[in-house]
Structures are given as structure tokens and as C-alpha cells.
Amino acid sequence: MNDIYRNLSLVEVYHKLEDYNKKLGELLLQNDLEEFQQTVEDFIDTGITDNPQFESALIIYRTAKPHYFIEGIPSDLIIQSLQNKGYFQDVPATFPVLDDTAIMQFATLTSTAPKRRRRSVISQEELEESFEELIDIYDDFIDYKPELTVTEDLKFIQDEIFFAYLSPMKEARSRIDCHINFSKFAIKGFDTEKVLYDDIAQTDNFSNRLAAIEEVVTNVYDTVYRAGSTLSFHDFFEIDQPYAETKTEKAKYSERQFFLGLSYHHAKFTDLQTKPYPKDTFFYLALAMFLSIPTTNRIEAFMNKFGFTLNSYYEIIRIKEVKGDTYHFYGHHFRKWLDSGIDYFLIYELLSKEWGNA
């Protein structure tokens, strides 16, 4: 290991993770999978993943960092592109940045800290509670072992797993995330752009969706900042801020577009309550990423609860077409990505049906 990376503090490791994922995001925006994979290799080669502070920094990064949804569609990459062009600077609360003090505070809530009894209501004033809620429910789920009953009431067990663990994890994650909706366009005469966006929302082409959303946002800003305008940014966008205690109705169903983007049915998550569990390794990996289960070992434990693993050497877990080339991803590919600290929503974008098409 490079001694420079061996001696980095937890805060410094956290910021390295931020820089690493921002670079990977730029490469996905450029449709450059080869350089993406090389950047992963280069980051691992620094030895930073062997830093004793790496796991704590990774838990904080993956759990406390908000993800962004536009009209329910996972849109971290689109937000990164818009920010690169200078948009959204007038809504800083939408993009909270953890300062060094906050990072260290979160560090006290990672797995080495004593467990605190889980609360049913999240306090808006204490951001740490959303973080701790998610970690605690996960730990409780891994400890859960259904009792063997004479009747083998699988419906009861499924209900318990769904309502006591999976659904609360989703709700805790939703409180952390940010949801941006364009529903006010029609009120302000942006019907053309609204129709355009509605059409693009159903496309299977990420580049076209990005271009359409950028066009809409550009028009909004041109209108807001036009001389004599009395309109503001909030006349066109409805935003559920990160860590907000209450969310709009659309924010409650973000898992639908997440799984649709991976070519699953929109009800794939809620089906876990009533239908037989799917026999699909990638689904449980995707579910773990959606819930922000923060480390490879924890994801493996989560998948094992359903009878699946990333440790199979020969199972192809995901096939992806990029620019006419076919990539086959095995468990060891995902373990490398997860171990290196890649943001889960970057993995999602890379493997979604929209990204990588012409």
C-alpha cells in the first residue's frame, strides 16, 4: 500500500471517495465504460481500500449521501451534469455537503458504536437519526430467524419480513433522498416542455433523456432570470429536500422507477410481500443497493437471507450491451466494484436499460 493512503484520516478517505465517484460519474456521462473500469483499477491500486478507516468512511458515504430522483426516476448522473453547467446553485439546501465535523459525528454511529433502540419517528432536526435508522433495521433483519412452525405459515413470515424490515428500510432511505418534480410547468405555461419531458420519461435512451431535461431546466432558468421576471425557481419545481421528515406522494414510490430502469416490473418490491420470492441473484443485489446496504459483506449477508450470493464463480449475474459490445458481469466483478467504494446509483445507471444506448 502507498504510505500516503495508509495514513489518510477518516475524513480524508471520505473526500477521496467523493472525488473518485465524481470522476466515475463523468466517465458514465461520456459513455466510456473502458476508462470507467480502468479508473476503478487505479483507485484500488492506491491501496486506499486497505486503509483501516476505509470501511467507516464508506458506510457514511453510501448511507448518508442523498440520491436524486426526477419525477421518480433515479437521476444522480443527470443532476451531476446539470450542476456541471451551473444549475441549482440557488437551492443549496437541496445538495447538503457533509463538513468534517458531521463526518466524524456519523462515524460514531457506524457498526462499532453501541446500538440504540430504533425510533418509529425520524426527527427532522437530527440528520443522524435517518442514518442510524437504516443501519439498525438492517442489523435487526440479519439477526432475524423465522421460527419453524407446524403449519409453515409462509404468508405470516413474508408479512413480517416485509413490514418489519424491508419496508422500514425503504422508508428510512426515502427520508435521506431528494425528489424533484416538474409538476408546476403546466401552471406557468410550460406545456411544451412538460409534454417533451413526459415523452422522454418513457425512453430507453439515457442521452436523449438527459438532453430533454437539460432543455427544460435551461428554459426555466432563462425565464426566472429574465429582466423584470417575478418568477422564482420554486415556481417550476417541487422539491422534497434531503432528510425531510415528510415527502410528497411521488417520493413514496421511488422504488418503482428504480426497478423499471433495470427491466423489472414496477411492483417488484411490493411483490415481496405477497408473491414467491424471485429466483434472481441480480434482483437481490439491486434491492440491497436501493436500500443502501453499505458494504460488500453486509450485502452478501443480506442476499444470503434469501438464498443468493455474489461468491459464485460461474453464474453470470448481469449482461449489458454498450455501444454494440456485450459485457458479462460475474459475482467477482460486482465484489470489486462494491469493495472499491463505487456509488450504488452509478452502478445502477451503468446497468440500467437506458445507459449505453446510441
Image (cartoon, rainbow, N blue to C red):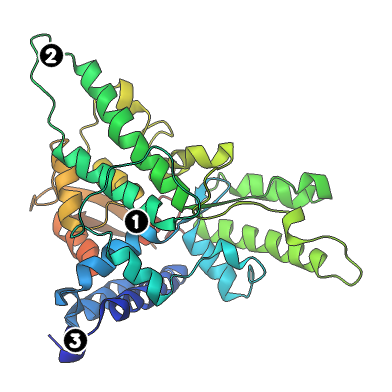
The image position of residue 275, as x and y in percent, is: 29, 22
Q: Secondary structure at mark 1?
A: strand
Q: 175 and 27: which one is in front?
A: 175
**Which numbered disc covers residue 71?**
none
Which residue is identified by label 1?
321
Residue type, mark 1 in image: Glu
In this view of the protein, can residue 350 be seen by the observer? no
Give the image quarter of residue 215: bottom right
Which residue is identified by label 2?
152
The image position of residue 208, as x and y in percent, is: 57, 58
The structure residue drawn at horizontal position 39% and vertical position 74%, both measured from the top left corner, is: 101
How crowded is the residue under tag 3: few (<14 C-alpha within 10 Å), some, or many (20+)? some
Which residue is identified by label 3?
7
Residue 356 vertical placement versus 162 (above, below): below
In this view of the protein, can residue 274 be seen by the observer? yes
Q: How far apart are labels 2 and 1 at the CA level?
A: 43 Å
Q: How far apart are labels 2 and 3 at the CA level?
A: 53 Å
Q: 154 and 281: which one is in front?
A: 154
Point out the image quarter for the N terminus.
bottom left
Residue type, mark 2 in image: Glu
Give the mark toward the camera: 3 or 1: 3
Q: How far apart are labels 3 and 1 at the CA level?
A: 40 Å
Give the image quarter of residue 346: bottom left
Q: Secondary structure at mark 2?
A: loop
The image position of residue 352, as x and y in percent, is: 39, 52
Of pointers 3 and 1, the one earlier in the residue sequence: 3
How crowded is the residue under tag 1: few (<14 C-alpha within 10 Å), some, or many (20+)? some
